[in-house]
Image: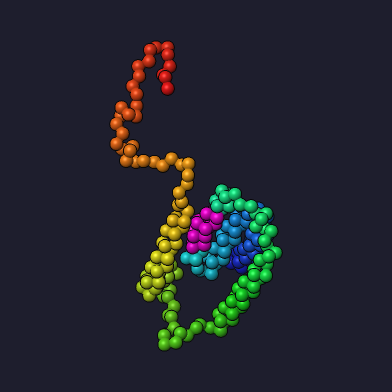
Amino acid sequence: MIQTIAFYLFAVMVIASGALTITARNPVHSVLWLILAFFNAAGLMLLVGAEFIAMLLVIVYVGAVAVLFLFVVMMLDIDFAEMRAGFARYLPFGLAIAAALLAEIVIAAGVWQAGPVQLAGRAALTPAPESMTNIEAIGALLYTRYLFVFEGAGLVLLVAMIGAIVLTHRARGGVRQQNVTRQNMRRPHEATRMTNPPVGKGVEL
C-alpha cells in the first residue's frame, strides 16, 4: 500500500515538474523544476530496486548537469526574447524529433513485453545471484566484460573536456598577465621601501 502511494506520488511529481520545466517563462525556474523532476525520478528508481540508477540521477544529473546549467543561465547575458522568436520557425523540426522519440518508445515497450532478446550465437545473460546487490552486479559486469568500452567512453569524455578548455581559453586584450619568473627574480629592495616616519606623521605612499 505504501509503495503504491509512493509510486503515484513520485509519478505525478515527475510529470508535473517536467511540464513546468517546459512551460516556465523564467529559465532559472525551468532548471529548478528540472532538478525536482530528477529527484522524483530517483525515487521511482528506488521503488523498483535500481538504487544505482537513482544515485546516478542525483549525483550526475542534479549535482553536475543541472547545477552547471543553472550557473550558466544565471551568469550569461542571454537574450531569451530573441530565442523565443525562433520557436515557430523550428517548430516542425521539433515535432519531427518528438515523433521519432515517441516511435522509439513504442517500439521499446513492444520489445520489452515480447520477452528477453536472444542474441545470435550467444547464450542469454544469467541473472545475478540474490546475494549480490545491483551495484555489485553492475560493477562486476562493467569491469570485466565491458572494460574496454568503459575505458573508451572515459577517453571520449577526456577529449571533450580538453576541447572545451581549448575553445574557451582565448587570448584577451587589455589584460595584464602574471609573470611568475619576474616575480621570483625580484629582490626585496625592489619590492619594499623601508621608512621611519616621525611620531605624529603618517606614512607617505
5 part of magenta stretch: no
From the top left corner, tell me how far across and down residue 88 is, in percent.
70, 64
Q: Position of residue 77 (x, y in %)?
A: 59, 49
Query: Dividing the picture into quarters, in which one does residue 13 lie?
Result: bottom right
Image quadrant assignment for residue 121: bottom left
Colouring scheme applied when the structure was drawn: rainbow
Is residue 65 covered in magenta? yes
Q: In which quarter of the image is the N terminus?
A: bottom right
In magenta, the rendered stretch is 55-69
Residue in the foreground of this view, choosing between 79 and 154: 79
Vertically, is 100 above or below 75?
A: below
Whether residue 34 is visible? yes
Q: What residue do we see at 39% from left, 41% from top?
A: 178
Question: In the displayed structure, does residue 91 sit left or right of residue 158?
Answer: right
Picture layout, residue 187 above or below residue 93: above
Q: Which residue is painted at 60% across and 56% down in the image?
A: 31
- Image quadrant containing the C terminus: top left
Compared with 148, 28 (above or below) is: above
